[in-house]
Amino acid sequence: ADFPLIEVGQLELNRNVDNYFAETEQACFAPSNMVPGIGASPDKMLQGRLLAYQDAHRYRVGVNANQLPVNAAKCPVHHYQRDGAMAGTCPVNGHMAVQSSGVNYYPNDQINDGAPVPDPSVAEPPMPVLEKAWVTRYSLSEDEDHYSQAGNLFRLMDESQKTQLTATIAEGLIHATESVQQRMLEQFRKADPDYTDHVSSVINTLRKKA
């Protein structure tokens, strides 16, 4: 056969459910739940179901359906989806019924303090479709240009407009942590180094006044 059976284990059904609603009606099965080392084929039906099943569960059961006992992983799972209906164990800090007040996005400046980070060892592996053709993840952000238009607009402004713009930005950034300020200044630098100099100058002035 072109596609011989490859046994990976046995699934043993050893009891009937105790609570039909909790263990059957709220159960959420999805083909996108995969163990490390297994990836999805490019089959169009499967690709659609990878999205549709989880989306249907979020509508039918709730955004935190994976925190219900019948669906929850047996090992700790850490990510940044928190709060919402039926929010139980916080996926950021692991605390039961106490949701973290920290950031809920990645990357962030709390990584050194134990915030969750992606584990590359469990990323979906590339798949050979033809002898010299592999299907793998493609990051759109790598090739996108987020800075040229911002830089061109800044260079079109006269000095008065630049002053108004950078003053408004600095007045907001002065209340952020220094690490956030530095990351934002680096973003401005990619658009135009003069952009960074303007904002940084206003921030320093505001610090002296504080």
Image: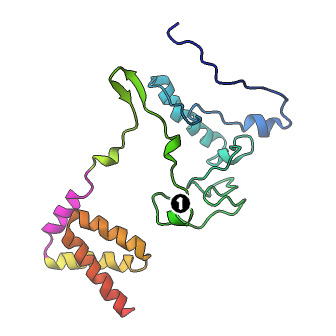
Q: Is residue 123 magenta?
A: no
Residue 107 falls in image quadrant: bottom left
Secondary structure under badge 1? loop
Q: Looking at numbered disc 1 in the image, what kind of residue is underneath it? A: Asn
- Relative to 32, say whether 189 is above or below: below
Q: Nearer the viewer, residue 66 or 157?
A: 66
Q: Is residue 89 left or right of residue 131?
A: right
Q: Answer left or right for 34 relative to 87.
A: left
Give the image location of residue 199, x and y in percent: 27, 77
Quadrant of the image for the C terminus? Answer: bottom left
Q: Residue 22 in the image: state x and y as whole percent.
A: 78, 40
Q: Nearer the viewer, residue 128 or 89?
A: 128
Residue 152, magenta (yes or no): yes
- Disc 1 designates what residue? 104
Res 54 quadrant in image: top right
185 relative position to 117: left or right:
left
Residue drawn 83% across the image and 33% down it: 17
Q: Which residues are magenta?
A: 145-158
- Name the quadrant containing residue 33: top right
Q: Residue at x 73, y 26 (%)?
A: 11
Q: Is residue 111 left or right of residue 172?
A: right
Coordinates of residue 148 in the picture (x, y in percent)? 20, 57
